[in-house]
Image (cartoon, helix red, strand yellow):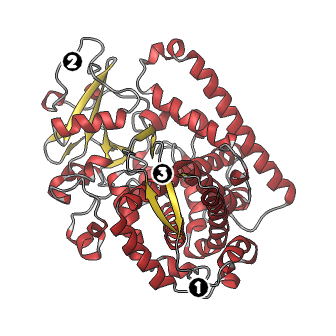
Amino acid sequence: MAETTQATGAGLPRGFRSAEQGWPELHRIPHPPRRVPLLGDVLGADRRRPLQDSMRYGRELGPIFRRRAFGKEFVFVWGAPLVADLADESRFAKHVGLGVANLRPLAGDGLFTAYNHEPNWQLAHDVLAPGFSREAMEGYHGMMLAVAGRLTDHWDRQLAAGRTVDVPGDMTRLTLETIARTGFGHDFGSFERHRLHPFVTAMVGTLTYAQRLNSVPGPLAPLLLRTAARRNAADTAYLDRTVDELVAARRRSGGGDGDLLDRMLATAHPVTGERLSAENVRKQVITFLVAGHETTSGALSFALYYLARHPEVAARARAEVDRVWGDTPLPGYDRIARLRYVRRVLDESLRLWPTAPAFAREARQDTVLAGEHPMRRGAWALVLTPLLHREPEVWGEDAERFDPDRFTAAAVRARPPHTFKPFGTGARACIGRQFALHEATLVLGLLLRRYELHADPGYRLAVGERLTLMPEGLRLRLERRQRPVSTPGDDDARLRRVGATGPDRATDV
């Protein structure tokens, strides 16, 4: 399928294409009222939260609608039949546009930002895919446990001091260290810092700048965003410099333990023998460091929010952890997949707030979307995943309600395909999704087994946007569980030690 994507995607129109150029019957698609000449649908728009702004319009205008800003027309889709049609890989491909295209100065032709016609996407995908095999995942498990141990050490200190914990900040520290250690053998020392690592600050800066570019007229961007552009250039240079130093250190050492960076530097394509260039290695490392932690930290943060808000769900999940893991100090790799209810909590959190909240699709050839809307070759639409995940005809009239039992095996089988898309779709879907799901399920299990989670009754969920989604200002009060699941201190010591010993020697398997 991936090779077909490469071949049939070649030659598609490149660059931004306003919807008038690709949708012959655009007038049939509704748009917000009160359009302003030249400016478009800007009255009442929320530039800080464009995704949630578009969700508001989607609820009013229906499953396909359009918005206009500064002379550019955009088509949005969220209806389940329309999205299912867009998921047809024979007729549609990934479209790199809007904020994703704005990241290309940073990530270039990395896996996430590459255009379909660029050969490095297929090369990198084929070289790196074995890095997410079951065998590779088992190798990462011990390092995931070790980083989780640093998180629980930090939370224990906060608890002892009577302080609440910064959930988004700490989940960002956790996931950055996890991908850095498992993929690249690097330690950012995030939990030893009082503030987030400068890499995170620079990364957030580049994501925020990419988001801002979407709401500024192209010709005016250099003038209106002059200061932000200088800051973004500095952020990008810092990220490049950090990765260059990381890669140089690996080259000097002569190799690691067969992690993702080793694969990038030493593995040739199994068919062509081609290797990744030095420039592409940099872009791929940046892609994995950014995408490999930013979305997972958001997913964990939303899941912890819902667990704290729904103590009955947390109690059920905690009981499953106790039953499945028993008194073993540390769970072996195979025990993570047995936490089926914990995984359902994670899936339901991703349903309501998929941290990568949209993906774009473009027509490979002239076609008709869902038998109703003609599209020319190269025309594209943006799928609003949070609204797709709230489609009443699929999820019910209570689709806004948090309910992990929407993901029982029977419920999943009963739903139409292509209605749950937190990782995108098709050949260009997230290559690291199993890595992220294993890490997040493991961490939720460890935290549930160790703590009772209490939310501030006055907190109201505020969702921040920087291309990805994250709950803002979420802090939780912790309470150490009264009933220990193993000899006191044993799990603490082993959790810190397991990264060095490996999971097979530090757990029961």
Is 10 left, or right, of 173 in this rendering?
left
Q: Report the Cα–Cα distance between label 3 and label 2.
A: 35 Å
Which callout, 1 or 2, points at the residue further toward the start of the chain? 2
Q: Residue at x 26, y 47 (%)?
A: 387
Which dot, 3 or 2, sits closer to the camera? 3
Badge 1 is on which residue?
328
For the residue labelled by badge 1, is the local secondary structure a helix, a strand or a loop?
Answer: loop
Counting residues from the start of the chain, the first of labels 3 and 1 encountered is 3
For label 3, count other residues whose C-alpha is less than 10 Å away and answer few (under 14), some (14-19) or many (20+). many
Q: Residue 313 location, x and y as percent?
A: 35, 68
Residue 238 is drawn in which quadrant? top right
The residue sitting at the right extreme is 252
Residue labelled with disc 2 = 35
Q: Amino acid at mark 1?
A: Thr
Real-space CA distance between mark 1 and mark 2, rounded to the nearest whole angstrom: 62 Å
User: Residue 76's image quarter?
Assistant: top left
Dots 1 and 2: beta carbons under 8 Å?
no
Q: Is residue 93 visible?
A: yes
- Would you name the residue on which mark 3 appears? 298
314 or 263: nearer the eye? 314
